[in-house]
Structures are given as C-alpha cells and as structure tokens.
Image: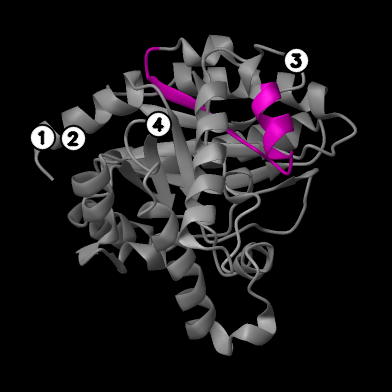
C-alpha cells in the first residue's frame, strides 16, 4: 500500500461522515450470527461449510447498493475473510477499490477467563506475522477486544495496559490499532466502570510515544458525552461505538447523544436480514439499517 493511499485512508477515517461496519464475526460468534441470518447449524457440516455460509452473507452485504463510501467509512474483517474474494478481487481490495471502504482486521485470539472482573485478551504469539500479512493485503488498521464486567480499578488498569502494549506493536508495524475495552452493557456498575476506563485510557494515550495514531472502540456510555475528551486528544484518529447487544434503534438513539463518536456496529447492522430474503428485500432492509446508523453517526 503506497504512502498516498495510506494518507487518503487516514483522512477518510479521521474526517469522513459515516460509520465503520463490523463484519468480523469469528469462530465462536459465527453460529449465532448465522442463526440470526436464518442459517441453522443443521444447514452446514463442519467449520468449512460454516465459514462458507458466513462469507456468503458478508459478500452479499459488501455488494449491496448502499454499502459504499457514501455512508460506510470502513469495515472490520475476520482474519479468514482477508484471504477470501468478493467480485473477483481479494476482500480488502474490493472494499477499497470498488466501494471506497477502508479495510480493518480483527487480530485478537479471543478472551481469557474472568479475573478481577475483566477479561483480558488471550496471548497472540503469531501477531507479527499476521500484521505483515495484513499490511501486504492492503489492511489499514486492526481491532482487538477485551471486556470489562464491573468497576474494578485494578482490572480496568490491566485491560487498558494490555491493549496499549499490543497497540504499540501494531503501530510499529505501520497499522492503526483500534483499542476496544468493551464494557458489558448489563454491568451493575457500568457507569462507574466507564469513568474509570476513560481515565485509564487518557493516561495511556498521553504516554504514547511517536506520532502514529490510534483509534478507540467503546461501549456507548451511560453518561452522554463521557468520552468526548478522548476524541479530542491529538493521537486519537476516531472514537467508534460498539452496539454491545442494544437493538439497532436503542444503539442509534444512544449514539446520537454522544458527539464525537461514530458507530462500529455488527449485530445492529445485520438486524432483520435473512438468507431467505429476495435481493430486493435484503438490499432494502440493509439500506434502512445503514441509513439509520449513518444518521446516528453524523
């Protein structure tokens, strides 16, 4: 990827109007995503057929008339998707060259068990190799997820420290990390956890060396505008919001009350879609979701 393309992608993510689509369902979350799409486990046999079904779903979304740079700034891919093709092109190239959509890659290997009311990321010893492969494929940035379940200061500090340790490894590889310490929307101490998280993130961002930027992907906060100060920090390219289990309407209503955040929704993006729909019905339903999420983001 040339420096000119990288600069164009950076400007698009930093200043563009729209949202980032999360199409990164992994092995653990794929069966549920397929079931919501009208594909039951009895419809496929083994992982290969399961991933073929979810790739067909993703390809249908990416090729839909409304899935373009007019409203979609970027798309987060699962690692396996990076090697797939859509419209005769590798997925990252199709997104950028045909849709003007900036490609990102999910790079974490899942969550460790709960400790100190949080779930850290599992070890990822092959990350350097994955980053080299991603950069060669035209990927702009990466995404990695941890989870905060309760307002435990020690746990939150540990989660954020791990995210930034790996984030610096990603920055060194020439990619933009999306730091994602999700706060469980069902937490009894959600608001308190988010205040602790904001402060821990601010401290880590202030300590970043070099000019390479980061992004943040955060649960829509209970206190409107809580993360506005993070969005204004010079090294934060963009703050995006995960839907976290909220319905599309609820997530969009909450997001609209948080200036400085744009959407990066997964389940909310695909809500109401099914394999059995005609192309016309599918495109209309997806287009309505895209428009709703776009309006909440701008």
State the CA–CA distance, disc 4 to disc 3: 27 Å
Judging from the image, what secondary structure is the residue with disc 4 in? loop
Q: Which residue is mark 4?
A: 71
State the CA–CA distance, disc 1 to disc 2: 5 Å
Judging from the image, what secondary structure is the residue with disc 1 in? helix
> Mark 4 or 1 closer to N-term?
1
Task: Give the vertical position of 120 relative to 206 (above or below).
Answer: below
Q: Which residues are magenta?
A: 234-254
Q: Is residue 39 magenta?
A: no
Residue 86: image x %, image y %?
29, 64
Q: Which mark is drawn over residue 6?
A: 2
Cβ atoms at labels 1 and 2 below 8 Å apart? yes
State the CA–CA distance, disc 2 to disc 3: 35 Å
Q: Which residue is mark 3?
A: 223
Judging from the image, what secondary structure is the residue with disc 2 in? helix
Horizontally, residue 175 falls left or right of residue 76, namely left
Assess disc 3: are there few (<14), some (14-19) or many (≥20) residues with their C-alpha within 10 Å of its C-alpha: some
Q: Which mark is drawn over residue 59?
A: none
Assess disc 2: are there few (<14), some (14-19) or many (≥20) residues with their C-alpha within 10 Å of its C-alpha: some
Residue sitting at x 47%, y 43%: 21
Residue sitting at x 39%, y 36%: 72
Residue 4: image x %, image y %?
9, 32
Mark nearer the viewer, 4 or 3 = 4
Residue sitting at x 49%, y 15%: 231
Cβ atoms at labels 4 and 1 below 8 Å apart? no
Relative depth, front residue between 68 and 237: 68
Cβ atoms at labels 2 and 3 below 8 Å apart? no
Residue 125: image x %, image y %?
43, 63
Mark nearer the viewer, 2 or 4 = 4
State the CA–CA distance, disc 1 to disc 3: 39 Å
State the CA–CA distance, disc 4 to disc 1: 24 Å
């Amino acid at each position: 990827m040339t420096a000119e393309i990288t600069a164009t992608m950076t400007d698009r993510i930093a200043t563009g109007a729209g949202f980032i689509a999360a199409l990164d369902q992994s092995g653990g979350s794929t069966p549920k995503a397929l079931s919501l799409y009208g594909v039951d486990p009895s419809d496929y046999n083994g992982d290969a057929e399961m991933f073929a079904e979810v790739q067909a779903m993703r390809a249908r979304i990416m090729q839909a008339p409304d899935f373009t740079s007019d409203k979609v700034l970027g798309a987060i891919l699962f690692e396996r998707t990076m090697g797939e093709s859509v419209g005769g092109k590798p997925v990252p190239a199709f997104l950028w060259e045909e849709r003007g959509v900036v490609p990102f890659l999910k790079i974490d290997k899942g969550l460790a068990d709960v400790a100190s009311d949080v779930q850290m990321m599992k070890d990822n010893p092959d990350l350097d190799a994955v980053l080299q492969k991603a950069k060669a494929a035209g990927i702009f940035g990466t995404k990695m997820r941890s989870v905060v379940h309760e307002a435990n200061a020690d746990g939150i500090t540990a989660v954020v420290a791990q995210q930034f340790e790996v984030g610096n490894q990603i920055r060194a590889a020439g990619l933009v990390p999306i730091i994602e310490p999700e706060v469980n929307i069902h937490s009894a101490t959600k608001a308190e956890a988010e205040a602790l998280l904001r402060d821990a993130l601010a401290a880590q961002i202030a300590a970043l060396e070099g000019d390479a930027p980061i992004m943040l992907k955060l649960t829509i906060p209970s206190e409107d505008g809580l993360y506005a100060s993070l969005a204004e920090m010079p090294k934060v390219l963009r703050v995006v919001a995960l839907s976290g289990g909220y319905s599309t309407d609820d997530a969009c209503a909450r997001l609209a009350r948080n200036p400085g955040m744009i959407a990066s929704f997964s389940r909310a993006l695909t809500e109401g879609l099914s394999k059995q729909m005609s192309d016309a019905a599918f495109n209309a339903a997806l287009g309505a979701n895209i428009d709703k999420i776009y309006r909440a983001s701008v």
